Amino acid sequence: MDFTGKAAIVTGGANGIGAAVARGFVQRGGRVCIVDRDADAGEALAAELGKSAIFRAADVTRAGEVQAYVQATLEAFGTVDAFHNNAGIEGKVAPTAEYEEAVYDAVMGVNVKGVFLGLRHVLPVMLRQGRGAVVNTASIAGLVGTPGMSAYVASKHAVIGLTKVAAGEVGPQGVRVNAVCPGPIDTRMVQDIAKQVSPNNPGGVEERYAAGIPLRRYGRAEEVANLVLFLLSDLAGNITGAHYVVDGGRTAS
Ligand code: NAD
């Protein structure tokens, strides 16, 4: 994979999976605009990556801030060749019968509206260019239900729907849109979920859950990044409208 001369935007790029994608894109010759609401981590990563990276603080649920990060990328790099539409939150773990409406709205706001707004403002640029590749971060929660995660599961099913619609719309103009579906990946997000499920023994949650995964472990952010980078690269030139699982075999049986 070679991203020399290419520019990417990575939302949720300051931490976890997004940070691994930003690093991987730059390591392979590209330039990246890291977008996140966590300014401290975003600035630190941009400093680590040097001249090939800029950071833009933004809340992906706000259209004006989305427009601003697209504009900033165009001003810095001239094109948007790759877009990892990745920012997401997990919300609370609670049965649907007790789920708080405000938490539901917050999860759908970031995970669905945020992804929609990213597509809404990046796709016109790619359509003008006549090329570009997008990867939306869904989850295995976009394929199967997990008790206690109604908003998150609904939001990730929606991400797969948005991916299919956008791919059908922009394919004729040379733009590809795919989704990735990670299983549990060792980032802040799964650690937070484990603390919610078992405040006194979060490590036990990982042990129990990993026992149900054929590879018997959580994935690493870099392992998701490898798949995302492949889908963003020209090697995936005939792939669009698809979703790919990276879950250690969790959903295979
Ligand atoms: P993470 O919490 O480390 O990273 C998420 C990033 O998104 C953070 O940097 C956070 O500041 C940013 N963010 C959250 N809300 C935002 C907003 N409104 N505007 C801008 N930035 C915002 O977690 P992660 O595991 O790296 O998650 C990345 C994506 O992967 C998410 O969409 C998540 O749902 C998905 N995912 C994660 C796992 C997992 O097990 N970790 C599994 C499947 C899917």
Image (cartoon, rainbow, N blue to C red):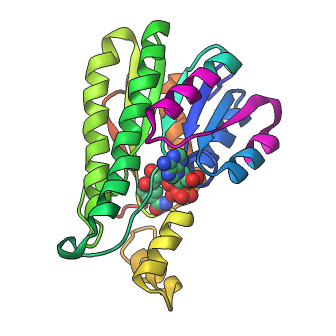
- Residue at the image point whose x is 28% and y is 69% from the top: 100
Q: Of 200 and 134, which appears nearest the observer?
A: 200
- Residue at the image point whose x is 45% and y is 29% from the top: 134
Find residue 70 and report its horizontal and vertical position in percent.
55, 25
96 sits to left or right of 138: left
- Residue at the image point whose x is 35% and y is 41% from the top: 113
Q: Quadrant of the N terminus?
A: top right
Q: Which residues are magenta?
A: 45-72
Q: Of 44 and 219, which appears nearest the observer?
A: 44
The secondary structure that most of the magenta stretch takes on is helix
Residue 217 showing in the rendered view: no
Residue 50 showing in the rendered view: yes
Find residue 2 and report its horizontal and vertical position in percent.
65, 25
Q: Of 106 and 249, which appears nearest the observer?
A: 106
On screen, residue 122 above or below 101: above
195 sits to left or right of 13: left
Q: Quadrant of the C terminus?
A: bottom left
4 sits to left or right of 117: right
**Membership of 83 in magenta stretch:** no
On screen, residue 108 above or below 228: below
- Residue at the image point whose x is 63% and y is 52% from the top: 38
**Membership of 49 in magenta stretch:** yes
Find residue 233 and report its horizontal and vertical position in percent.
54, 27
